[in-house]
Image (cartoon, rainbow, N blue to C red):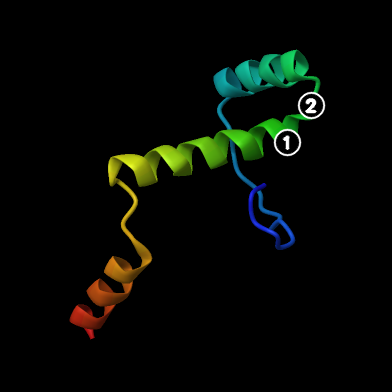
């Protein structure tokens, strides 16, 4: 985790095919399943930011104001 706040706990449903891959990845890294899941989410969010798929926070606020 890169932030200095307490991590948020959540529950997600992961397809069996991904569970097998994540378990293998966790074992290869010597880390727990949840840790590798968090890493995968962090990597996905980083990629979404880099590609522009994830809008900047200001863009979301402006879009919400337009709807109101």
In the figure, is residue 18 to the left or right of 68? right
Q: Give the percent coordinates (x, y) of residue 68.
A: 23, 86
In front here: 60 or 67? Answer: 60
> Residue 56 is drawn in which quadrant?
bottom left
In the figure, is residue 20 to the left or right of 46? right
Q: Give the percent coordinates (x, y) of residue 29.
A: 74, 19
Dot 1 falls on a residue whose secondary structure is: helix
Label 1: which residue? 35
Query: Which residue corresponds to the image point at 68% horizontal and 31% vertical from the top-left?
Result: 36
Q: Give the percent coordinates (x, y) of residue 21.
A: 61, 16
> Is the residue 41 above or below the residue 29 in the image?
below
> Is the residue 33 above or below the residue 17 in the image?
below
Query: Which residue corresponds to the image point at 65% horizontal and 16% vertical from the top-left?
Result: 20
Label 2: which residue? 31
> Residue 23 is drawn in which quadrant?
top right
Query: Which residue corresponds to the image point at 70% horizontal and 60% vertical from the top-left?
Result: 4
Q: Give the percent coordinates (x, y) of residue 7.
A: 71, 56
């Amino acid at each position: 985790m890169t932030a200095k706040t307490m991590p948020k706990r959540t529950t997600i449903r992961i397809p069996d095919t991904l569970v097998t891959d994540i378990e293998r990845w966790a074992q290869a890294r010597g880390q727990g399943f949840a840790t590798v899941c968090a890493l995968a989410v962090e990597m996905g969010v980083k990629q979404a930011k880099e590609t522009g798929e994830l809008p900047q926070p200001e863009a979301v606020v402006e879009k919400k104001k337009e709807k109101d």
